[in-house]
Image: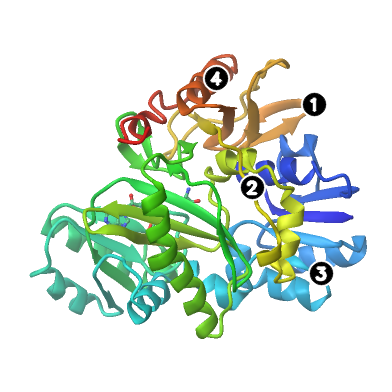
Amino acid sequence: MKIMVIGGGGREHAIVKKLKENPNVSELYCLPGNGGIARDATCIPVAATDLDGMVCFAKEQKIDYAVVAPDDPLAMGAVDLLEAIGVPCFGPDRKAAVIEASKIFAKDLMRRYGIPTARYETFDDMDAALSYLETAPMPAVIKADGLALGKGVIIAQTLPEAKEAVRTMMADKRFGKSGERIVIEEYLEGPEISVLSFTDGRTVVPMVSSMDHKRAWDGDTGPNTGGMGTVAPNPFYTPEVAARCMREIFLPTIRAMTAEGRPFKGCLYFGLMLTGDGPKVIEYNCRFGDPETQVVLPLLKTDLLTVMQAVTEERLAECPVEFSDGAAACVILASEGYPGSYEKGYPIRIPDDLSAEVYVAGAKDRDGQLVTSGGRVLGVTATAPTLTAALQKAYAAAEQIHFENAYYRRDIGKRALTAPEA
Ligand code: AMP
Ligand code: GLY
C-alpha cells in the first residue's frame, strides 16, 4: 500500500513510525515531513496547506490512503478534496473539522446538547464585549473564535487585562480573521486531561489518556507553548472519571455532530478539565494532539493503519483497539528562547544506542547532518511499566542528546505523580 501523511512535526513522526510497523505499507510519504522524518519516510516538499499540491501528488503516485494530521488542512477541506479523487483518508471532512476551527461552533454545540463546559458568551462587537466584562467575574478567559496556532487564548486576571485582551483580538487583529469573533468564558480550575479518541461517527474509542505541559518553564510558569512534554496515562483520569466522560461528554459529542449533519470521522481530541463539578470540556481538537501523540501511539498495541481504516470505513465497532498497561513520557527538547525568538541551524547529536524513541519536530537535514530548524526540536519518548520509570528513562536519554541552545523542562510528569491514583 502507498500511504501519505500530511504534516511535518513530531506528531507526524510518531504517526509515520507507527504506520511503518504494518508490513502491507510498501511506500510511505510525508508532505512536507522534516529532516528527521526523512529517515522513516520519503519527504515531499509540499506544504501541509498546499491542497492542490497534495491532490496532484496523490493522483500522480496513486496513493492508496492518506492521513491528514494538522488542523489547517483539515479545516480547509483537504479530506473532502482527496476523497473526491478517490483517496480514502483518516481525518474529518471540512464540515466536521469546524469543531476545532470555530470555538463558537464548539461552545454552541455543547450548550445545545448539554455537554459540560465553562459558561460563556460570544461577541462579534467589541463594545458589547467590553461592557460585558465590566460585570464579568475575574479571572476571565478570552478566546479568539478561529485557529490561532494555539495562541488565541488569553487568561486575564484583572479587568484591565481582560479589556486589553479583547482589544488585541478585535481591534488590533493580532490573530487576523480568527479574532473577529470571540468567546469570553468562565475560568475553571483543576487538573487537565487530554483524551484522544478514534471515532467513525457512530462508535467512539478513547485512547489512553495523557497530560500536556503547555507552559514554557518549570512549575507551569512562563508563556504558553505548543507543549513542552507529555505523560500517559494521566493518573487523574480514573476509571470513574473515564466512565463519566464517556456518558456525559464523548458519546453526546459524537451524537451531536452526527445530529448536526457533521458526522466526525478521525481522531477527536477532548481537552478536559477535572473541576470540582466534574469533568468539563476546555476544547475540542479535530486531530491528534502534539505532543500527546508522542506518548499515546507508543502505547498502542493494535496496528494503527488497521484502526484508521476501520474508522474510514465506519466499522470501528468491529475493530478491537488495545493499549499496553505501561506508561510513556515525552520530554520536548526546544531551542532556548522558544516560544519567543531563538536561533537555529545547530547540529544535533543523538547517540545510536539511545534507550528512548526520538521524534523529530523542528530539524532539517544539512548535508547528512540533522540541524535545528524550529522552536520545538525533538520529542524524547520512553515507555516503561510505571510513569516514574518512563520519566527516568526519557530524562536519561535527553541528557545524552546534544545541540547548542537546547532547553527542556525538568519537571515533566511531576504534577501527574502527585495525583491520588499515581
Ligand atoms: P485551549 O487553546 O483552548 O486549549 O486553551 C489553552 C489553555 O488555556 C488550556 O490548556 C487551559 O490550560 C487554559 N484554559 C482554556 N480555557 C480555560 C478556562 N475556561 N479556564 C481555565 N483555563 C483555561
Ligand atoms: N497539545 C495540544 C494540541 O495539540 O493542541
At numbered mark 2, what does the secondary structure look like: helix, strand or loop?
A: loop
Marks 2 and 1, how far apart at CA: 38 Å
Cβ–Cβ below 8 Å for labels 3 and 1? no
Q: Give neighbour class at mark 3: few <14, some 14-19, many 20+ (Cα, 10 Å).
A: some
The residue beneath circle 4 is: 393
Residue 240 appears left or right of 141: right
Q: Which image quarter holds the N terminus?
A: bottom right
Which mark is in front, 2 or 4?
2
The residue beneath circle 1 is: 368
Instruction: Identify the residue shown where x is 45% and y is 58%.
Output: 270
The residue beneath circle 3 is: 87
Which mark is in front, 1 or 4?
4
Q: Amino acid type of disc 3?
A: Val
Q: Is residue 51 above or below residue 381?
A: below
Q: Earlier in the sequence, mark 3 or mark 1?
A: 3
Picture mark count = 4
Instruction: Identify the residue shown where x is 42% and y is 43%.
Output: 225
Instruction: Identify the residue shown where x is 23% and y is 59%.
Output: 277
Cβ–Cβ below 8 Å for labels 2 and 3? no
User: Which sits in the foreground, 178 or 220?
Assistant: 220
Q: Earlier in the sequence, mark 2 or mark 4?
A: 2
Marks 1 and 4, how far apart at CA: 28 Å
- On the image, the x and y values in percent for residue 140 come to 20, 60
Q: Amino acid type of disc 4?
A: Lys
Q: Earlier in the sequence, mark 2 or mark 3?
A: 3
- On the image, the x and y values in percent for residue 120 come to 25, 71
Q: Decide if residue 327 is in sight here.
A: yes
Q: Which mark is residue 322?
A: 2
Q: Which image quarter holds the C terminus?
A: top left
Marks 2 and 4, how far apart at CA: 24 Å
Q: Which mark is residue 293?
A: none
